[in-house]
């Protein structure tokens, strides 16, 4: 009888719920905030000041805006995805989940 190898639990992350999507958005914001040259354009687009971030970080609309910013700046999208060890498509999927999270109550 052949012994089977243990299955790896390191499968690619699948974004299927709002909690996972929020995790991607918060990671993206952390990535942007780590470098003032990355953060400044996003803040300029949003009209927010750095001091405002703490109050809006949990807002789905703000999280969508953060992900939109990355999606619209492919170099930063690829850099974030590489640093976070995720597929860039997960950022797009997270954006879609968060944009429609209000449409599906209790989707967490």
Image (cartoon, grey):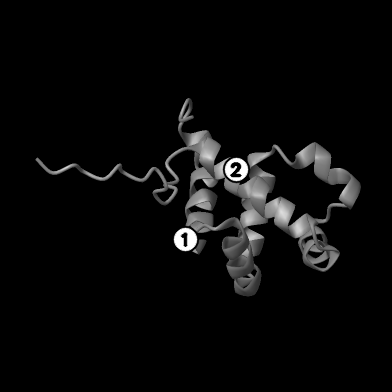
User: Which residue in the protein does label 2 denote?
Assistant: 23
- Callout 2: SS: helix
3D distance between C-alphas at marks 1 and 2: 15 Å
**Which image quadrant: the N terminus?**
top left
- Residue at the farthest top position: 106
The image shows residue 23 at horizontal and vertical percentages of 60, 43
The image shows residue 71 at horizontal and vertical percentages of 58, 64
Q: In the depicted view, which residue is nearer to us: 56 or 7?
A: 7
The circle on residue 62 is none
Q: Looking at the image, which residue is at 58% across and 64% down?
A: 82
User: Which residue in the protein does label 1 denote?
Assistant: 89
Say few, some or many: other residues with alpha carbon within 10 Å of mark 2 (under 14 / 14 to 19 / 20 or more). some
Image quadrant in which you'd find residue 28:
bottom right
* Count of numbered tags: 2
Image quadrant in which you'd find residue 7:
top left
Q: Looking at the image, which residue is at 47% across and 25% down?
A: 106
- Callout 1: SS: helix
Tell me if residue 69 comes above or below residue 12 in the rendering.
Answer: below
Q: Looking at the image, which residue is at 81% across and 63% down?
A: 35
The image shows residue 79 at horizontal and vertical percentages of 63, 68
1 displayed left or right of 73: left
Q: Looking at the image, which residue is at 80% across and 61% down?
A: 39
Say few, some or many: other residues with alpha carbon within 10 Å of mark 1 (under 14 / 14 to 19 / 20 or more). some
């Amino acid at each position: 009888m052949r012994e089977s190898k243990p299955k790896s639990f390191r499968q690619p992350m699948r974004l299927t719920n709002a909690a996972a999507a929020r995790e991607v958005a918060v990671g993206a914001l952390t990535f942007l905030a780590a470098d003032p040259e990355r953060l400044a354009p996003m803040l300029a687009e949003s009209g927010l000041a750095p001091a405002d971030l703490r109050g809006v970080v949990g807002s789905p609309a703000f999280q969508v805006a953060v992900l939109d910013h990355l999606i619209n700046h492919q170099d930063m999208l690829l850099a974030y995805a590489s640093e976070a060890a995720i597929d860039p498509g997960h950022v797009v999927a997270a954006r879609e989940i968060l944009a429609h999270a209000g449409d599906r109550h209790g989707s967490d």
